[in-house]
Image (cartoon, grey):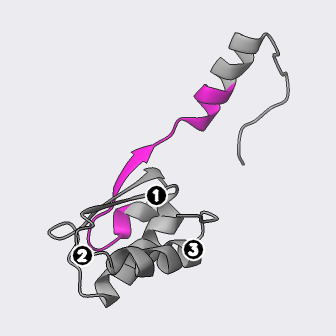
């Protein structure tokens, strides 16, 4: 289902998914989107992870506070960017460190 990686888009998409009787899993393209998924499933009376599994990517620190616990895959974006630059031969000397 389409989404824009926001909690609201996860919520809207998962209201539709919750109406599918045999849906057993949802993959969200961001942790923030997964927060909306969790809310929509809860409102529909679906238990996570007993009825529906929810998995997302990002590994943002806030995901540790989700209830129920959020299964998330941390993405090493800086390392991936460096590897992409090495692969394509385009190296950058710009400092990408976050403050």
- What distance separates the C-alpha of mark 2 from that of mark 3? 21 Å
- Name which quarter of the figure residue 54 lies in: bottom left
Q: Residues within 10 Å of mark 1 (few under 14, many from 20)?
A: few
Q: Residues within 10 Å of mark 2 (few under 14, many from 20)?
A: few
* Residue located 67% across and 28% down the image: 81
Q: Do the residues under discs 2 and 3 have CB atoms within 8 angstroms?
A: no
Q: Position of residue 57 (x, y in %)?
A: 46, 50
Residue farthest to the front? Answer: 21
Which residue matches tag 1?
61
Which residue is under mark 3? Answer: 9
17 up-or-down from 75: above or below: below
Q: Are marks 2 and 1 in contact (CB under 8 Å)?
A: no
The residue closer to the viewer here, 31 or 47, is: 47
82 in relation to 97, above or below? above
Could you tell me which residue is drawn at 39 percent across and 81 percent down?
Answer: 39
Looking at the rendering, the stretch of residues picked out in magenta corresponds to 64-81
């Amino acid at each position: 289902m389409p989404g824009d990686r926001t909690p609201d888009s996860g919520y809207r998409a998962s209201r539709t998914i919750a109406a599918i009787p045999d849906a057993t899993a949802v993959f969200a393209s961001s942790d923030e989107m997964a927060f909306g998924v969790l809310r929509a499933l809860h409102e529909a009376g679906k238990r996570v992870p007993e009825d529906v599994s929810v998995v997302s990517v990002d590994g943002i620190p806030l995901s540790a506070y989700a209830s129920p616990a959020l299964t998330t895959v941390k993405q090493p974006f800086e390392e991936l960017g460096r590897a992409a630059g090495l692969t394509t031969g385009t190296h950058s000397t710009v400092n990408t460190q976050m403050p």
